């Protein structure tokens, strides 16, 4: 999942477009940790948005914990 988030950031593609590109590109799949080329849909594009929201929340909580804020 982190590989998809990185590819999205590096390419500037939308969630839907990055999923389409990864489905088409074996090198991108390798970057994301796939051991072999997969031709079926790897995940729903909304999963990327949900994961990004969770990651942002986790990062914010970590910053608050470092500063001693609950």
Image (spheres, helix red, strand yellow):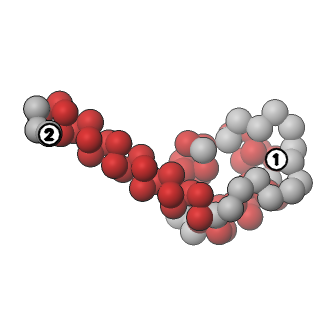
Q: Is residue 18 above or below residue 59?
A: below
Of residue 38 and residue 62, the one placed in the foreground of this image is 62
Q: Where, by quadrant of the figure, is residue 62 drawn?
A: top left
Identify the disc placed on residue 10. none
Residue 9 seen: no
Task: Say which element carries label 2.
Answer: loop
Q: Could you tell whether 44 is left or right of 62 in the image?
A: right
Q: Could you tell whether 66 is left or right of 6 in the image?
A: left
Task: Say which element carries label 1.
Answer: helix
Of residue 19 and residue 10, the one placed in the foreground of this image is 19
Mark 2 or 1, which is nearer the eye? 2
Question: If the image is split into quadrants, where does the C terminus sit?
Answer: top left
Residue under pointer 2: 70
Residue at the outermost front position: 70
Residue under pointer 1: 26
Whether residues under marks 2 and 1 lie with C-beta atoms below 8 angstroms apart, the answer is no
**Rendering coords of residue 38 (x, y %):** 86, 48
Question: If the image is split into quadrants, where does the N terminus sit?
Answer: top right
Comes first in the chain, label 2 or label 1: 1
**Rendering coords of residue 59 (x, y %):** 32, 42
**Rendering coords of residue 21 (x, y %):** 73, 61
Residue at 61% from the left image edge and 50% from the top image edge: 4
């Amino acid at each position: 999942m982190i590989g998809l988030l990185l590819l999205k950031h590096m390419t500037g593609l939308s969630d839907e477009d990055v999923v389409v590109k990864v489905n088409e590109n074996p090198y991108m799949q390798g970057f994301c940790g796939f051991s072999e080329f997969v031709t079926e849909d790897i995940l729903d594009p909304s999963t990327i948005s949900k994961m990004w929201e969770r990651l942002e929340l986790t990062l914010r909580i970590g910053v608050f914990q470092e500063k001693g804020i609950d």
